Image (cartoon, rainbow, N blue to C red):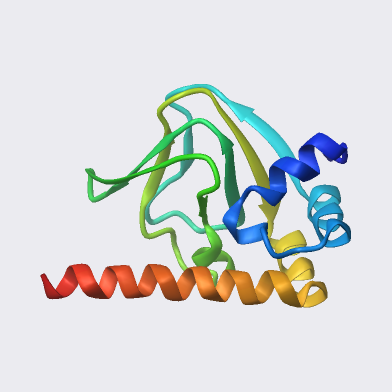
């Protein structure tokens, strides 16, 4: 349960959390885990049920669908929110490419934050809308 000022400052740099107050960031810090993983660690597996939401603090991960690399994620990127919102299976696999530091929110903690922090829900929805627009634009090309 990370709580230090340095950690809160780091959370503030994550686009999803940038509009939140220090108090709201503290709530996220108290309910999350700060996890370090080695390169090669599978963070989520395509088709598996989702139960966690991840924010990359440091390092990079590759995203694959049906065995093909579709993206690289770095600091500030978030993933896993879709499975938490509708409890659907993961639509991609995410594997650490480098040593990584992650903020991990479990399903129960994530739902509590959505209920308690309206700013978080708005930012999450804006991020999802942005991702949907990008996917839509790619499908037209």
Q: How many marks?
A: 0
Q: Residue, x 86% and y 39% (percent of image)? A: 5
> Picture quarter containing residue 4?
top right
Q: Residue, x 77% and y 67% (percent of image)? A: 113
Q: Position of residue 105 (x, y in %)?
A: 69, 52
Left or right: 69 in relation to 58: left
Viewer-closest of 13 and 92? 13
Instruction: Name the quarter where the N terminus is drawn.
Output: top right
Left or right: 141 in relation to 29: left
Q: Vertical placement of 107 versus 101: above or below? A: below
Q: Position of residue 40 (x, y in %)?
A: 42, 25
Instruction: Name the quarter where the C terminus is drawn.
Output: bottom left
Q: Residue, x 14% and y 75% (percent of image)? A: 140
Viewer-closest of 9 and 140? 9
Viewer-closest of 124 and 44? 124
Q: Vertical placement of 59 versus 76: above or below? A: above
Q: Vertical placement of 47 versus 69: above or below? A: below
Left or right: 89 in relation to 86: left
Q: Residue, x 45% and y 54% (percent of image)? A: 48
Q: Position of residue 46 (x, y in %)?
A: 37, 52
Q: Position of residue 139 (x, y in %)?
A: 17, 72
Left or right: 53 in relation to 47: right
């Amino acid at each position: 349960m990370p709580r230090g000022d340095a950690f809160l400052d780091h959370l503030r740099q994550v686009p999803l959390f940038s509009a939140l107050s220090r108090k709201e960031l503290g709530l996220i810090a108290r309910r999350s885990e700060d996890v370090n993983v080695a390169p090669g660690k599978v963070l989520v597996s395509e088709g598996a049920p989702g139960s966690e939401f991840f924010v990359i603090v440091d390092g990079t991960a590759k995203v694959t669908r049906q065995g093909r690399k579709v993206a690289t994620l770095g600091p500030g990127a978030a993933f896993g929110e879709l499975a938490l919102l509708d409890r659907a299976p993961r639509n991609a696999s995410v594997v650490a490419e480098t040593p990584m530091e992650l903020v991990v929110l479990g399903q129960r903690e994530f739902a509590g934050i959505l209920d308690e922090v309206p700013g978080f829900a708005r930012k999450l929805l804006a991020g999802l809308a942005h991702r949907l627009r990008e996917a839509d634009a790619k499908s037209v090309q």
